[in-house]
Amino acid sequence: MPIYEYRCAGCSNLTTVFVQGYQGKDDIRCEFCGSTEVKRIISPVNVHQSSSEKLSSYDPASKKSESFYRDSRNIGLHAEHMLKKAGVKPTEEFKTKLEKLRTDPSRVIKDSDS
């Protein structure tokens, strides 16, 4: 099912539309102001990287975007990088704890409170 994004000429907000079948431009309205004066834009693309690709391309000195810090898959990336740089193989316990952090970061806070 295609997903299209439209920028409103009136309020400049983005509206995301999930298209099923044919939907003409006249059928698209801004979800914020209701205007039909919308223009389809090219949406940003996400690229999937494996864990090893992500680790190989990780540069601790590079500036990170805000989305980098919101992505829980990046938790522990610096620690993994430092281990690799030092030539130390991560233990299974380290890998298990890191996976728990990445899949449920809020649990760490819950567990530390008890």
Image (tube, grey):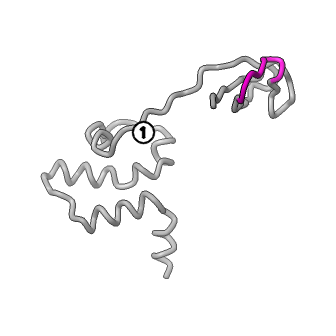
Left or right, 5 with reference to 30? left
Q: Residue furthest front?
A: 21
Task: Tell me which amino acid carries mark 1.
Answer: Lys
Asked if one can make out residue 14 in the rendered structure from this viewpoint, the answer is: no
Locate residue 10: give its quadrant. top right
Q: Which residue is mark 1?
A: 64
Left or right, 38 with reference to 62? right
Residue sitting nearer the eye, 22 or 12: 22
Residue 68 counted in the magenta span:
no
Locate residue 13: give its quadrant. top right
Q: Please tell me whether residue 63 is drawn above or below residue 80 in the rendered image.
A: above
Q: Secondary structure at mark 1?
A: loop
Q: Please tell me whether residue 2 is drawn above or below residue 97 in the rendered image.
A: above
Q: Which residues are magenta?
A: 20-27
Residue 49 at x, y percent in the picture: 37, 38
Asked if one can make out residue 19 in the rendered structure from this viewpoint, the answer is: yes
Q: Residue furthest bottom?
A: 114
Residue sitting nearer the eye, 63 or 108: 108
